Image (cartoon, helix red, strand yellow):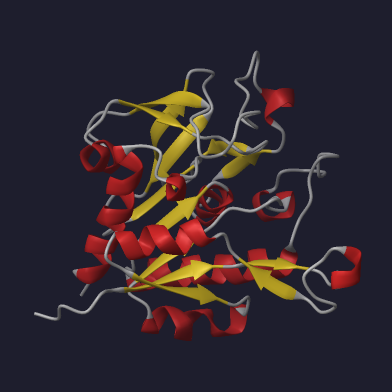
Amino acid sequence: MDASPPLIGVTLDREPPCPPEQGGYSSFPWYAMRCNYMDAVTMAGGLPVGLAHDAAQAAAVMARLDGLIVTGGAFDISPDLYDGGAPHPTVTTKATRTDAELALVRAALELGRPILGICGGEQLLAVALGGTLIQHIPDAIASPLPHEQPNPRDEAGHEITIVPGTRLAHITRASRMAVNSAHHQAVATPGRAIVSAVAADGVIEAVELPGHPFCIGVQWHPEFGISTGDRLLFRALTDASRHRE
């Protein structure tokens, strides 16, 4: 048996030029990623690698990887991708990143590679599976929870209820979890996926694809590891990636 750690691709964010003299990182476009995404993979026994935004190479990249994490970011999925109508005034997009991540997800689905979508990554996963999104939660949900929580991201913002019998319930060994929250959009319909967790206000907090070796999207940020369930989720992804065919 191969005891080497599975190679987990982690999608990067992309930022426009901002010279250091203006408080930015570089005068040229640059990739970025919070350390805790990579740290969570390493702690779970995986070998993380950052993925550039190149849709044309997505299939070749996924053929080399054992698993995929689609990360979140301060941007939205274009409503053009799910027939969502005109963009809400709050919507901002990153077309190059989204195109690359969609190509990676589709390749991973085709190859049967384990996939974990986080926050915006969950939303993109749902869209890739034929689902739709709520463009702005306050305009669509009556009395919504503060999904853009005011307290620090390494603390819980609200609780979720996990659907019994789902893969998520099996992994986390829980029926409820306290999670952090940093989003203004959410999954409206999950397409071919099923809903595996919801918030008290009805917002979908997790989806998963039955029959796939591991295909789960969560609306919160488990890379902060604020609960046992968060850490178990990364462990389950790593284990599934290690045992893929």
Where 189 falls versus 37 (above or below)?
A: above
For the point 49% across and 45% down, which residue is it?
221
Quarter the N terminus occupies: bottom left
Residue 189, percent across and down? 53, 37
Number of marks drawn? 0
Foreground: 210 or 199? Answer: 199
Q: Nearer the viewer, residue 19 or 229?
A: 19
Residue 111: name its quadrant.
bottom left
Query: Residue at horizontal 61%, vertical 71%?
Result: 100
Q: Residue furthest top?
A: 143
Which residue is at the far front?
A: 21
Q: Residue furthest right?
A: 22
**Residue at the spot 48% in from the left edge and 65% down from the top edge:** 105
* Quadrant of the frame with the C terminus: bottom left
Q: Is residue 103 above or below residue 148?
A: below
Q: Is residue 183 left or right of residue 129?
A: right
Residue 46 x %, y %: 31, 68
Look at the picture and state if 13 lies above or below 207. Answer: below
Residue shown at the point (42%, 26%) measured from the top left: 160
- From the viewer's side, name the closer residue of 24 and 216: 24
Q: Nearer the viewer, residue 139 or 220?
A: 220
Picture layout, residue 23 above or below residue 77: below
Q: Where is residue 239 shown, x and y percent of the image?
A: 22, 62
The location of residue 157, given as percent across then percent down, is 53, 27
